[in-house]
Amino acid sequence: MRYFLLRPETLFLLCISLALWSYFFHTDEVKTIVKSSRDAVKMVKGKVAEMMQNERFGGMDVLDAEFAKTWEFKSNNVAVYSIQGRRDHMEDRFEVLADVANRSHPSIFGIFDGHGGEAAADFAKAHLPEALRQQLLTYEREKERDREKDKEKDEKKERVGLSYPSILEQQILTLDREMLEKLSATYNEAGTTCLVALLSDKELTVANVGDSRGVLCDKDGNAIPLSHDHKPYQLKERKRIKKAGGFISFNGSWRVQGILAMSRSLGDYPLKNLNVIIPDPDIMSFDLDKVQPEFMILASDGLWDTFSNEEAVRFIRERLDEPHFGAKSIVLQSFYRGCPDNITVMVVKFKAKASEQ
C-alpha cells in the first residue's frame, strides 16, 4: 500500500483532487488568488506586447530609474541624446559649435568618452572646441585676405600652409600636453577618447583618438566609416606598444599594460609616460559633392557595443523624421539590448544642395 501511494501517478491524482476540493470548498480565497495571478500574467503580457509593438522606441518616455539621468541637445540639423545608463557615473561629454548666422568657420562636433573619472572628458569639452574655433576663424580670415590679394598666392598657401586636418592634429596634440600637465599635477589618472568632426559646405574632416566612432550614411543608404577604433589587439597598435616596451593582456578584453582597453587616448598620464599610449589622431577627409551624404552618426563606444555601423545607419535612416532624428531611439534601443556603459549619440543631418541655395 505504501508503495502504491508513493507512485508518481498516485501523487499526481492526489494533487488534482486537493486542488479541486480547495476550489469548490474555499471558493472566495482561491478565486482571489487565481484572479490576481491572471491579472499579473495579463499585465506582463501587455507590457511585452507593447514593447514588441513599439520596437522602434520612438517617443518613449524615459521613466526607468536606470537611465533617468539624460542629456540632450537639438538644433535645426543636429540632435544629441545621452544617458548614464547602468554605470555609477556619467563620463561621456559632447559639444556642438556652429556659426549658422555668419558661417565664418566650419561647424564643430565633438564626442569625448572619459574613463578613470570625468576630469579628462571635462577638460577636452571645455578647451578643444573653443581652441579649434579660434584657430579656424584665424585660418578663414587669412584665406579670405589672401584670396582678395592674389589668387595665385592663395593656391600656394593651400599647398604649403594650414588645412583642416593639420589644424585638428595640432590642436588635439596641444590639448593633450595641457591636459597632462594639469592632471598629473594632482595625480589624476583620468583619460578620454576624442572624436571631432569639422563640417563646411563642401568638406567633412574627422579626427579620432580612441574608440568612439563616426559613420556616415550616403544617399544610397551605405554606411561609410568616418573613423577606426584604436584597439590594443590591432597589429599596428600591438607592434607599436611592444616597441615601446609595453604589453597587452586579455582580461575580458585586450588591454594595454592590463589596464586600458584602447591604445590611444588623451590624458592617462602614467601610461603616456611609458609611451605605450599615444594621443596621435587618425584623420579622414571627405568631399561632400562626391559622397552626397544624408547624415552622420558620432557616438561613444556604448552604442557600438550593441550596434554595427550598418545596423546603426539602417536604424537611424528609418527614424530621421523623429524629433531627435533617431538619436533618442537608438540610445534607448542600445540600453535595452544590455549595454552596460554610458551611451551618447549625435546625429547630424546634411542639407540637400537645393535647400542650401
Image (cartoon, rainbow, N blue to C red):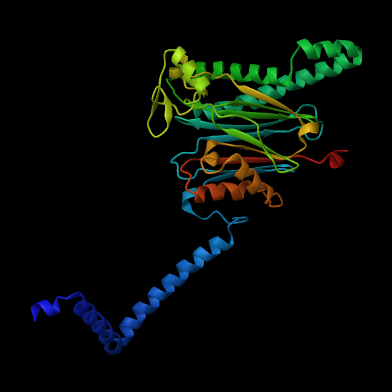
Q: What residue appears at the point 45 percent right and 41 percent down from the top-left corner?
A: 87
Residue 195 x/y as whole percent:
61, 29
Furthest residue to the left?
1
Q: What residue appears at the point 85 percent right and 42 percent down from the top-left corner?
A: 355
Left or right of 199? Residue 124 is left
> Does 127 sit above or below residue 336?
above
Confirm whether residue 72 shows in the render: no
User: Dividing the picture into quarters, in which one does residue 110 lie?
Assistant: top right
Residue 306 x/y as whole percent:
52, 44
Residue 59 x/y as whole percent:
62, 56
Confirm whether residue 153 shows in the render: yes
Residue 357 x/y as whole percent:
88, 38
Choose between 201 and 94: the one closer to the eye.
Answer: 201
User: Dividing the picture into quarters, in which one does residue 127 lie?
Assistant: top right
Q: What residue appears at the point 74 percent right and 22 percent down from the top-left corner?
A: 136
Furthest residue to the bottom?
25
Identify the image quadrant of the N terminus.
Answer: bottom left
> Does 134 sit above or below residue 342?
above
> Does 140 sit above or below residue 302?
above
Left or right of 353? Residue 296 is left
Choose between 87 and 123: the one closer to the eye.
Answer: 87
How many numbered marks, from 0 up? 0
